[in-house]
Image (cartoon, grey):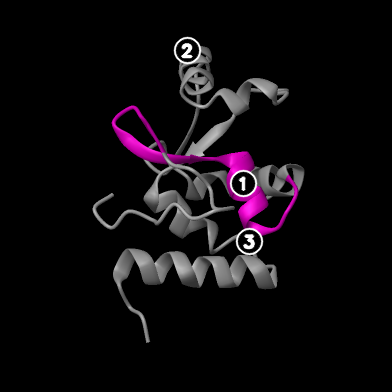
Amino acid sequence: MKNRIPQERGKPRTYVIRGQEVMLDRDLAKFYGVSLGVFNTRINRHIDRFPADFMFQLTEEELEYLKRWEPALNKLKFNEKPCVFAEAGLLMLSSILKSKKAVQVSIGIIRVLFKTHK
């Protein structure tokens, strides 16, 4: 991601997994102002919009790597292995998450990625 999304307080952290800069599903759900359950339901309903280079589920080894990298993740309960989203996946999220906050987040992300500030 050449135009890296700024890491501001309260914003999802980025990690490098499989050579891609990605963000965790649970972080993005909070950021977009929806529960993880709603977030995952929307993804599952539109799974055809998320090929493997947009989004993928972490392996057990990758999850353990993240827990070592980000100790705060050790405190979280994972019912299943989380999914992560690359830059293209972030853009696709804007087409399926429709809350007011999600729209504003999507606009902000697109502006950062494409430098289209007014």
Identity of the residue drawn at 55% across and 66% down: 105
Q: Earlier in the sequence, mark 1 or mark 2?
A: 1
Q: Earlier in the sequence, mark 1 or mark 3?
A: 1
Q: Earlier in the sequence, mark 3 or mark 2?
A: 2
Residue 21: say if magenta: yes
Q: From the image, state whether disc 1 or disc 2 is nearer to you.
A: 2
| 92 and 73: which is toward the camera | 73
Q: How many marks?
A: 3
Q: CA distance from mark 3 to mark 2?
A: 30 Å
Q: Secondary structure at mark 3?
A: loop
Label 3 crowd (10 A; few <14 / some 14-19 / many >=20): many
Q: Which residue is mark 2?
A: 61
Q: Is residue 73 above or below residue 52?
A: above
Label 2 crowd (10 A; few <14 / some 14-19 / many >=20): few
Q: Is residue 82 above or below residue 67?
A: below
Residue 101: say if magenta: no
Residue 81 in sight from this viewpoint: no
Q: Which residue is mark 3?
A: 97
**Residue 68: % across, % down:** 49, 17
Residue segment shown in magenta = 15-35
Q: Is residue 5 left or right of residue 31?
A: left
Q: CA distance from mark 1 to mark 3?
A: 9 Å
Q: Which residue is mark 1?
A: 43
Identity of the residue drawn at 62% across and 55% down: 31
Identity of the residue drawn at 68% across and 48% down: 39
